[in-house]
């Protein structure tokens, strides 16, 4: 116990810069990578101490090699290697994901980012002139010239190109979705030339994005963030709100709505609530 406490104290006070978050340090003529206290410290045996430079917490290079943690990135050129963001990097010959070469077109290797990202480093895609990559795998059939990231509610997102649409994190396109006409109506609803699409509880405890079979795509509109309506019905996510009047249906909050006769929470009637005087809690 005393040895463990002393070791922690030594790391905390060490002028070499080790921390609980890990990273590189040079100490006693060695380059060391620290994974964190649980995994301990590992000597980067192949590193040249005199020329070693840490690029960030996980990447480093010397005159001979590029390193990801304690491992050599095979084939990477230390003179031209650069970390792009997240796990993506490149050199004069390749684009990499987590140290694995995935692209032979580094001149056009760029990230596809969430346009509404607020500094969370949410990077899951990259592209070059011919392919789109989800982490270290190319997405079959994806067009890099038209591939975009579309934010949704609760941190979910869609991606689509001129032909296809993909759900959050999936590499297989949604069946029947038309990428060319796909448009965002709200953080929950989308429409293409054939269908209305939405996020909802398709099966018990399974949240997925898919077609809303009863929605009329020609007249469907989003009402607030999570409600929608067409000429015949009102919806909460992908669920029909039975008996709602679409002509007078309006959202009064993220989970509340009303029409001329009733108030709704999600897709349920709020018993006894008067739509003429109802105000959503907190708003």
Image (tube, rainbow, N blue to C red):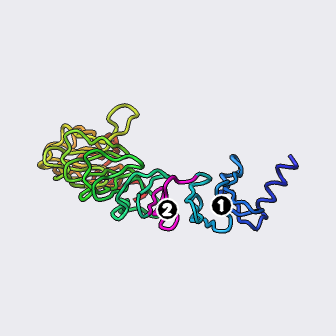
Query: 278 left or right of 23?
Result: left
Residue 241 appears in the rendering: no
Q: Camera-side residue: 137 or 172?
A: 137
Q: Secondary structure at mark 1?
A: strand
Image quadrant in which the C terminus is located = bottom left
Image height of 233 relative to 128, above or below: above
Q: Residue furthest right?
A: 2
Cβ atoms at labels 1 and 2 below 8 Å apart = no
Provide residue 120's location: percent of width, then percent of height: 48, 60
Q: Position of residue 79 (x, y in %)?
A: 51, 68
Q: Is residue 109 above or below residue 216?
A: below
Between 24 and 252, the one nearer to me in the picture: 24
* Residue 167 x/y as whole percent: 32, 45
- The overriding secondary structure of the stretch rendered in magenta is loop
User: Quick check: 64 left or right of 115?
Assistant: right
Query: Which residue appears at 75% of the width and 63% of the height?
Result: 29
Viewer-nearest of discs 1 and 2: 2
Q: Decide: few, some or many residues near mark 2? Use Cα within 10 Å; few <14, some 14-19, many ≥20.
A: some
Question: Mark 1 or 2 closer to N-term?
Answer: 1
- Whether residue 275 is in magenta: the answer is no
* Residue at image point 11% right, 48% down: 218
- Residue appearing at x 67%, y 52% in the figure: 36
Determine the CA span between mark 1 and mark 2: 20 Å
Indicate whether residue 77 is drawn in magenta. Answer: yes
6 sits left or right of 29 in the view:
right
Total labels: the figure holds 2
Which of the labelled discs sits on residue 77, or is there none?
Answer: 2
Residue 24: which numbered mark, if any?
A: 1
Under circle 2, the secondary element is: loop
Q: Which residues are magenta?
A: 72-91
Which residue lies most toward the top here?
A: 204
Number of the label disc, if any, that sits on residue 152: none
């Amino acid at each position: 116990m005393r040895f463990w406490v002393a070791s922690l104290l030594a790391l905390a006070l060490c002028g070499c810069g080790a921390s609980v978050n890990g990273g590189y340090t040079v100490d006693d003529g060695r380059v060391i990578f620290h994974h964190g206290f649980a995994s301990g410290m590992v000597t980067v045996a192949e590193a040249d101490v005199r020329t070693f430079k840490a690029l960030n917490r996980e990447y480093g290079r010397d005159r001979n090699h590029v390193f990801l943690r304690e491992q050599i990135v095979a084939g990477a050129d230390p003179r031209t290697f650069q970390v792009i963001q997240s796990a993506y990097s490149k050199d004069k010959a390749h684009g990499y994901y987590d140290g694995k070469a995935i692209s032979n077109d580094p001149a056009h290797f760029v990230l596809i980012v969430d346009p509404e990202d607020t500094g969370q480093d949410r990077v899951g895609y990259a592209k070059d002139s011919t392919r789109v990559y989800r982490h270290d795998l190319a997405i079959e059939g994806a067009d890099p010239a038209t591939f975009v990231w579309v934010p949704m509610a609760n941190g979910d997102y869609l991606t689509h190109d001129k032909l296809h649409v993909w759900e959050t994190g999936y590499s297989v396109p949604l069946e029947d979705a038309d990428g060319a006409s796909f448009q965002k109506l709200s953080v929950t609803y989308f429409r293409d030339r054939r269908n209305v699409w939405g996020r909802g509880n398709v099966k018990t405890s399974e949240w997925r994005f898919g077609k809303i079979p009863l929605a009329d795509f020609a007249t469907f509109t989003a009402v607030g963030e999570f409600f929608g309506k067409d000429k015949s019905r009102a919806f909460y996510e992908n669920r029909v709100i039975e008996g709602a009047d679409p002509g007078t249906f309006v959202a009064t909050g993220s989970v509340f709505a009303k029409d001329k006769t009733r108030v709704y929470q999600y897709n349920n009637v709020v018993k006894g609530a008067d739509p003429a005087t109802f105000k959503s809690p907190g708003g």
